[in-house]
Amino acid sequence: MGKRTEHGMTDHAAFQSTLEAAVRRHLGAPGEILELVRLTGGATKLTWSFVLAQVRRELVLAPAPADAERARLVSFLGHPGERDELNRELAARIRAGDIALDDPALLAHLRLSLVEALRINNPKWIGAPASADQ
């Protein structure tokens, strides 16, 4: 499907192109659309276009915030690691009481992570422009 990056992800442009072509082919075939509507309990072309827009935003916009989150976690926790591992460690340290819930650095990290996620998942809610076909 594409070249793998150092993070184990496939080439986003190739994946996006392949995904969009597949979805457009699928949405363009009336019999298949009716079957999708039946199988999904009434989902429409509009619903699927929203799904496609969400997937497109994920593919285009998610890598940079993920890298930024990882960098913040490395700085906060004081050692390198993969983002998921660092997030698990952060959660464990919060549960253990090693990191206070009102720690300013923790709160700044959580706020920024939330804003970054909302820019992808619901850009109109956050009021931030998304560059990948909202």
Image (spheres, rainbow, N blue to C red):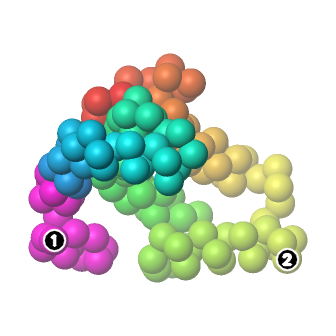
Which quadrant of the figure has residue 120?
Answer: top left
Q: Look at mark 2 in the image and give the residue it sits on.
A: 96
Report the residue that reaches farthest toward the right.
97
- Marks 1 and 2: CB-CB under 8 Å? no
Number of the front mark, 1 or 2: 1
Principal secondary structure, stretch drawn in magenta: loop
58 horizontally vs 42: left or right: left
Classed neighbour count for the residue bearing mark 2: other residues with Cα under 10 Å, few (<14), some (14–19), many (≥20): few
Residue 1 — which label? 1
Query: Quadrant of the image for the N terminus?
Result: bottom left
Kindly identify the residue that appears in the image at 64 percent across and 49 percent down.
110
Amino acid identity at mark 1: Met
Residue at far front of view: 31
x 50%, y 53%: residue? 39
Q: Quadrant of the C terminus?
A: top left
Position of 114 relative to 73 (above/below): above
- The disc labelled 2 sits on which kind of residue? Ala
Looking at the image, tell me whether mark 1 or mark 2 is earlier in sequence order: 1
Q: Position of residue 94 (x, y in %)?
A: 79, 68
Q: Is residue 60 visible?
A: no
- Secondary element at image label 2: loop
Query: Hey, which quadrant is residue 68 in on the image?
Result: bottom left
Residue 20 in the figure: left or right of residue 42? left
Give the image location of residue 96, x and y in percent.
85, 77
- Residue 95 point in image, percent of width and height: 83, 72
Residue range highlighted in magenta: 1-18
